[in-house]
Structure formats: structure tokens, C-alpha cells
Amino acid sequence: MSAQVIDGIAVANLILSDTAARAAQFAEANGRKPCLATVLVGDDPASHTYVRMKTNRCRTVGLDSRRHQLPETATTADAVAVVSTTAADDTVDGILVQHPMPAQVDEQEVFEAITPAKDVDGVTGASFAAMALGHNGFSSCTPAGIMHLLDAYDVDPAGQRAVVVGRSPILGKPVGMLLLARDATVTYCHSKTVDLAGVVREADIVVAAVGRPELIMGSWIKPGAVVVDAGYNPGNVGDVEYATAAQRAGLITPVPGGVGPTTIAVLLAQTVKAAGTPRATRRSTK
């Protein structure tokens, strides 16, 4: 068998089309466009590229963007100050703090300076708790994008065994929570997991989110399983050995062109959602 390839670009375009329509409605009603502010610390080339992609996409769907750049020598306090000032600005609807940051910066402390009502990237503890408990809030963008991909291809997680390889706070952990909320039976795997191959072989849905190129061998994939590769490593290589996995899976995401496009689309969609939140509600979440 050969897997059906999940077209992340097509799914993202559907999200972006809806986002553009809602952004236009907001602009007409409020006399301004929804606004996403980005905060970038340091000189990491990949981070600069990602921020540029996101700001360009803002423009194409009718959002404004503001960029705050801090030097490589910036401290945690410097970054927190910028984020706090931006969070207090009522003309900014969403805040994205690009990561990774330089080693001397405490990323989580910087994230926590984001007002929950503007945490459109879903990186704060408040957003994770809201998502895990099923409360109103913003999901981490990549996990939410993964759920969009599953829905677009009529994959119902209910009753399925889902294996998440990776436990980062903005990808592995939250995607497991979202799958659990959809009645999947979720197993988290990580560097201490015994017999990773055996666990993966039992999975109906595999989410690879560990950041190690081709860690998951294609021969481990259960025939007909859904494989979502959220890894992106040098050389356009994912966390799954694609060529072999594609011969065994039922559905599989490519790298690139799978998970990545939906991540940006969800970020912008959540920014427009934040813009539409009444001002009184925003202040009450601070």
C-alpha cells in the first residue's frame, strides 16, 4: 500500500481564507486591522526567516504586524519589558515571542509576560491549562494545526491509540491533550521510553514531535496508521523515515508542506479571534 499524502498547504489555505474574511469584517467594523506583534531576541537566522514568513502572511490576509527586535545580548528582563509593554497596548491583538532565544534568556518567563487574551501562540501556562481543561483560550498553534489536518481528512481520534513522540510544552504535551479531549487513548514517548519501536507499532495515530531526524523508522509504522510528522530538521528531513513509512501508513504528512503551513494559519486565525474579543473581557484576563 502507499499512503495518501496530507496536503497541509491546502488545509492552511482554507483556514487563511476564512481568516481573511473575518479580518476584513473586523477592519470594517473597527476602523483598523487586527494586529499581531512579534518579539524576536537575537540573531538566529532561522528565527528571522520564520518571523518574516509570518509577517508576510499577515499582509496577505489583511492583518497588521509590528516587529520588536532585541539584540543577542538582551536579558530576560529586557525581553519581559518589551512583551509587557506590548501586552498593555490595546491596538495590539496578539503577541508572538519567537523561540529559541539566546541561552541567557529564560524563555518561559518571557512567555508568561504575555497577557493570556493575547497569547495567540498558546505558550503560556494559562493557555495550556485552559486547553487541557477545555476552557476558553488559545491552543498552541502547531498542535491546533495538527487537529485541523486530522479533521480535514476525516480522521476521528475517538477510540484510537495515539502515540506522541516528544513532550515539549508547546508541541508534544499539548497535542496529547487535544487528542485526549477527542477521546483518543494517548501514550507519550520520550528519551527514557523503553522499546520505542514496540510502542509506535501499536499506534493508530503517530505524532512525531521530538526534533531528531528520522528517529522513527518507517518499519515501525502500523499498516494503515496516520502519521503526522511535526519535525523539521536540516535538509528538509522530518522525525519519521518518510520513504518507508509512506509505504505502510494510510495517511502521512510530508516535510515540508504538512504541519508547518497550518501552524502559521492557526496563529493568524487566533489573532483575528483575539481582535474580536471585547475589550472588557481582555482586561479581565490580565
Image: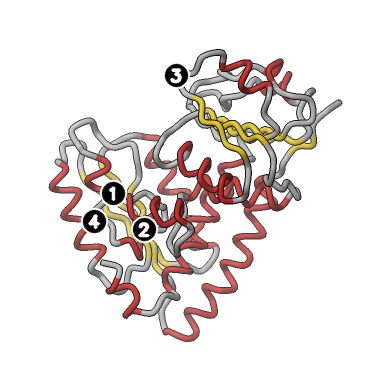
Which amino acid lies under the numbered mark 1 shown in the image of this protein?
Answer: Phe
Question: How many residues crowd around disc 1 within 10 Å: few (fewer than 14), some, or many (20 or more)?
Answer: many
Q: Residue at x 25, y 66 (%)?
A: 286
Q: Of helix, strand and loop, which one carries label 3?
A: loop
Q: Measure the C-alpha gap from mark 3 to mark 2.
A: 29 Å
Q: Residue at x 45, y 39 (%)?
A: 173
Residue 115 placement: quadrant: bottom left
Can I make out residue 268 in this image?
yes
Q: Of helix, strand and loop, which one carries label 4?
A: helix
Tell me, yes or no, whether the two marked residues, 3 and 2, touch with CB atoms within 8 Å. no
Q: Is residue 269 left or right of residue 156?
A: left
Q: Nearer the viewer, mark 3 or mark 1?
A: 3
Tell me, yes or no, whether the two marked residues, 3 and 1, touch with CB atoms within 8 Å. no
Q: Measure the C-alpha gap from mark 2 to mark 1.
A: 9 Å
Residue beneath disc 1: 111
Residue reaching furthest right?
1
Q: Measure the C-alpha gap from mark 3 to mark 4.
A: 33 Å
Residue beneath disc 3: 191
Q: In which quadrant is the N terminus drawn?
A: top right
Which amino acid lies under the numbered mark 4 shown in the image of this protein?
Answer: Val
Question: How many residues crowd around disc 4 within 10 Å: few (fewer than 14), some, or many (20 or more)?
Answer: many
Tell me, yes or no, whether the two marked residues, 2 and 1, touch with CB atoms within 8 Å. yes
Q: Measure the C-alpha gap from mark 2 to mark 4.
A: 11 Å
Tell me, yes or no, whether the two marked residues, 2 and 4, touch with CB atoms within 8 Å. no
Residue beneath disc 2: 119
Question: How many residues crowd around disc 2 within 10 Å: few (fewer than 14), some, or many (20 or more)?
Answer: many
Q: Nearer the viewer, mark 4 or mark 1?
A: 1
76 is higher (above) or lower (below) than 229: below
Q: Nearer the viewer, residue 225 or 74?
A: 225
173 is higher (above) or lower (below) than 213: below
